[in-house]
Amino acid sequence: MKICFVGGGNIAQAIIDGLLKSQLPPEAIVCIERNQEKIDLLKNQKITVASFECLSEDIFDLIVLAVKPKDALVVAQKIEDLAPHSNILTVVAGIGISKYPTSASIIRSMPNTASAYNKGITALYAEDQEAPAFKNACDLFERVGHIMVMENEDDIHAFTSIIGSGQAFLFQVLNIYLGELKAINKGNDEHAINIFQDFVSSLGDLFGKERDFEMLINKIKSPGGTTQAGLESLEDSKIDSIKILFYFLDSILKITICLFLARFKKNCVKFSQITQFQKKIQPKTLPHLIKPKSRFE
């Protein structure tokens, strides 16, 4: 399989790192990139850095579109002009397949940066999921982690909220834990970080063994103990409202897409239209969960 990356940003670099770790030879990868710092990094990995003309001079199994959303459609058209009927694998968020050049075979994906460590989780969607290009895309991302094939393109929005952005939410929670551990372990942050690294690693090990959070919780808590009291407090405070966080992110994604497409078409989106859109997708439980009650209030 021969792959050309158009754009060498963070997500492209993460995928390339994972592919190289999977023993895909660097000769199988070409990258079109203009940033000198990124070019130097790619060359250190023995990746060929080329110009757009390579698209008309060579045949690629997949052309990975990895540019900023504002540039995606223009660059996709350039790919189409240079390599008609090519197989474009887009990692660009927020732009549906119908917006791309019609003659190209478009595969939509939503990977995450864990691909660099071959532990990525990638959502994939194409209108023809039996096509060789889609199977190549699945093979590519299976090299760098796990894949989830979406039955509907709209499911990618929910996936982005849970997996793509969800890492940042969990990192934020863990960062609070780390801060508290540093405070307890006064003056020795490095020691606290080492302890915390083992703590986080153990969470993955425990879940890998049990695969059931309820069972893991029951093994830790004791009737009438501090853990039980804390869990009850979380339940009373409607900690499940973290789902609302994903709802809001999903809403923001959809609204951002609307604004982007309107700007691209040089149309104007009125604020009232966005408000109506928000009301349309607002869950019925939202008012109840915005102001959770705590048993300690």
Image (cartoon, grey):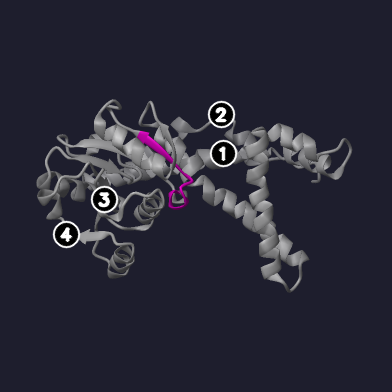
Q: Which residues are magenta?
A: 115-124
Q: CA distance from mark 2 to mark 1?
A: 11 Å
Left or right: 11, with 165 as reference point? left
Residue type, mark 2 in image: Lys
Q: Is residue 218 left or right of residue 281?
A: right
Residue at image mark 1: 244
Task: Say which label, 3 or 4, has the lower sequence index.
Answer: 3
**Amino acid type shown at disc 3:** Ala
**Residue identified by numbered label 4:** 51
| Of the two numbered discs 4 and 1 in the rendering, the one whose residue sits closer to the viewer | 4
Q: Residue at x 45, y 37 (%)?
A: 159
Q: Secondary structure at mark 1?
A: helix
Q: Are marks 4 and 2 in contact (CB under 8 Å)?
A: no
Residue type, numbered disc 1: Ile
Q: Nearer the viewer, mark 4 or mark 2?
A: 4
Question: Outermost residue, right direction?
Answer: 224
Q: Tell which circle, 4 or 2, labels the residue nearer the N-terminal end.
A: 4
Q: Earlier in the sequence, mark 3 or mark 1?
A: 3
